[in-house]
Amino acid sequence: MPTVLLKVNRKEYHLQVAPWVSLLDALREHLNFTGTKKGCDHGQCGACTVICDGKRILSCLTLAVMKNDSEITTIEGVANETELHPLQQAFIDHDAFQCGYCTPGQICSAIGLLKEGKAKTREEVKELMSGNLCRCGANVGIIDAIMEVKGAANE
Amino acid sequence: MQKSVGQPINRLEGKLKVTGAAKYAAEYDVKDVVTGYVLSSPVTKGKILEMDTSDALALTGVIDVITHQNRPKLAWFDIQYTDMDAPPGTVFKPLYNEKIMFNGQPIALVLAHDLETARYATTLIKVKYEQEAFDTCLENNLDQGRNAKKGFATLLKPPPPKPTGDFLNAYEQAPIKTSTSYHHSAEHHNPIELFATTTVYEGNGKLTIYDKTQGTINNQLYVANIFGLRYKDVRVLAPFVGGGFGSGLRPQYQLFLCVMAAMHLKRNVKLTLDRKQMFTFGHRPETLQNLRFATDINGKITALNHSAFAETSQFEDYTDPLVAWSHKVYPSANTLFDQKVVPLDVFTPIDMRAPGGCSAMHAIECTMDELAYKLKMDPLTLRLINYSEVDDSSKKPYTSKALKACYLQAAEKFGWDKRNPEPGSMTKGNKLVGYGMATGIWDAYQFPSRVEAMIDKDGKFILNNAVTDIGTGTLTVMTQIAADELGLSMKDVDFRYGDSKKPFSMFQGGSAMTSSTGSAIVVAAKELKVEIDKDLKTITVTRAVTAVAAGKIINPKTAKSQILGSMVWGISKALHEESIMDENLGKYINTNLGEYHIPVHADINDLEVIFAEENDELINELGVKGVGEIGLVAVPAAIANAIFHATGKRVNNLPIHFDELL
């Protein structure tokens, strides 16, 4: 079985996984980073979104062995030691979740989105966040939270 | 001390949810856990002739394969498999025998050291089937329709009310009348969290079970009854539930299979369904409704007839309460209501957010719109003409009903007076613009519940209840209520929940108090705007206003989220979601989130919520009512009516596809 080096949330993990193990299952089943969620396993819901080398990716459509030596940030690594990431706080303030299951993916995706710098307007943010489904219907709060943080970053 | 009730307080569990620390059913770090994977039947009806599991068993890492042939011996009396939400009939028993009753039925459970091995091993099982002819088409089987059998569940879902007056004569004589049919596709709840169970085998007949459920005690009793365990030795925990919407009201089959495997192996077992398997159990049934309403020349309703057919399984009679709603809102001297179940070769439907009501009110409120046009009357005026302070169906006054305030506040906020009633008359660039409105009504159910309270050594007040918080804000709201009642600050109250070990809360048989004093309902008025591309006919809900009267609002922030969320569900029901049944194959063909459409962020625009003030002193001491369903009920009709206003076309089948406007 191949060994893969995954750097997750600034820590190194040497993992023996079969080549068919997805990054999502490696994180959840092997490393116990269960903040990354499985909703469809098909790249359709976005719940498994993590940040890999600075970009948002769907960990269910990524094999763990493809990410040898990559820097991966999951929801558990988004905050610093003393305070929440501004998006995490904005999600709480805007009640941008109900059941909370899609939330880690929404937040990781939003971090990636803001870094990409492509979305200028609310409409564009909505469009470029549309890969992340929310079944509770917290869409308005989610986009409000992202717009608040985006606005603060632009000032 | 400042009261917390009425304050827009952030969810208390918010930090756990935004940091990934909240643990859902499949996420507990349990030692030496065995992972299961379910093999689903590709056959809709028939029986298994042969099953060869030798290749699967030979695969390194596979521990066992359980099928109907080698399953552990259990007592298989139907009564032991029933649950608090079981409709009348014979409950489904997984791996009971060789019979296949619906597509996707679980027929084997592979147990392995890891997920990938278990999943792969399911593909190595060889099965020979004998297939039988099946019926999965509602429309072709309406002649099989019959009254639903009666049982425990009938208490909450009574049969249609008896006729009043003489409908046929009144309808015949009426100057203004409509006769319209409405079709609704089946829908699946599809919470984003997959159904999952982790069973910790504690030994000495004890189990700790982390389960995706909306009722910890329901599932505790279910497991104990089937496996012959003492109630106190089975603990079911669900502190976080990744969406329910009704799908967690009954124990799902992964619970049974996971516990069976844990008992069999005497080990810890984890079992998660995949997304495709999320389409193999309860769902909102496909329905066909026929409505005939009549009014006098002034718009006063004189006759109401609502009849419906809804699918159910061959083994249980699920009832989606469809036909009694119109008479709860609109008085009429002559009424006729009828509902039939049509048994098909599918799994039993189950309650899904605003069960019955959201499908029924779509049909009722579109019919009202049709009448308004026949009367050449503003749709809002027609509602006000038929406004009542008494529930004509029970002749009891409503405990409170600020619906008139809702109508007026929503109309003012929305700008309803700017509407030119002529269909197709309003445009914006290349878009046809339509305004639509509808009424929403939902029963204000109440279920008795017991809370245990104690004070810890630091003076903190601990409250215990078995209830789950599926995203509804229960933890926050209960803490607010308790803090105010006790005169404490919220941080001195610790509400503990989602655990079957906590005091029992039985949900059936409630509403005793409300039924004796009055008719308890939640109401809403919805006004919304659609824009339809003149060439492509793509439909966008650009703006929607909901005015809700739901008694006292404990937490305006979480309550608003509930309404917004259910408005999104309404948009979804009207324009997006449906489980598409292929009648020739006997199965749903869009069993994934790419093809089962729900709204994405780009589909959701300007949504507004108004809470109309309502002081209900009769319903309960706090004057509170639930807000989980009401926001959904009026949306589909408001959208369909707005589409008619924009295009002059009535589409009475949900969801509405844009090609129907071409």
Image (cartoon, coloured by chain):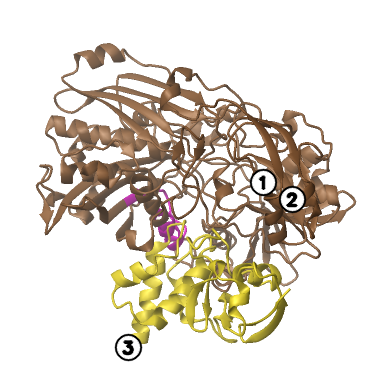
Chain colours: A yellow, B brown
Can you say whether B279 is above or below B365 in the image? below
Mark sitting on residue B39: 1
Residue on which disc 2 sits: B110
Percent from the top left, x then y, of residue B641? Answer: 23, 42
In the foreground, B353 or B90: B90
Label 2 vs label 3: CA separation? 56 Å
Q: Which amino acid is tagged 1?
A: Leu
State how many labels appear.
Answer: 3
Point 80% across, 60% down: residue:
B60
Quarter of the image holding residue B388?
top left
Q: Is residue A145 left or right of residue A101?
A: left
Label 2 vs label 1: CA separation? 8 Å
Element under label 3? loop
Element under label 2? strand
Label 3 vs label 1: CA separation? 54 Å
The chain identifier of the residue carrying mark 1 reads B
Residue on which disc 3 sits: A155
Q: Are marks 2 and 3 on the same chain?
A: no
Q: Which amino acid is tagged 3?
A: Glu
Q: Nearer the viewer, mark 3 or mark 1?
A: 1
Quarter of the image holding residue B93?
top right
Q: Which residues are magenta?
A: B547-563
Q: Which amino acid is tagged 2?
A: Val
Q: Is residue B406 visible?
A: no
Percent from the top left, x then y, of residue B523? Answer: 36, 43
Percent from the top left, x then y, of residue B622? Answer: 50, 50
Mark 2 vs mark 1: which is more N-terminal? 1
The chain identifier of the residue carrying mark 3 reads A
In the foreground, A94 or B391: A94
Q: Are marks 3 and 1 on the same chain?
A: no
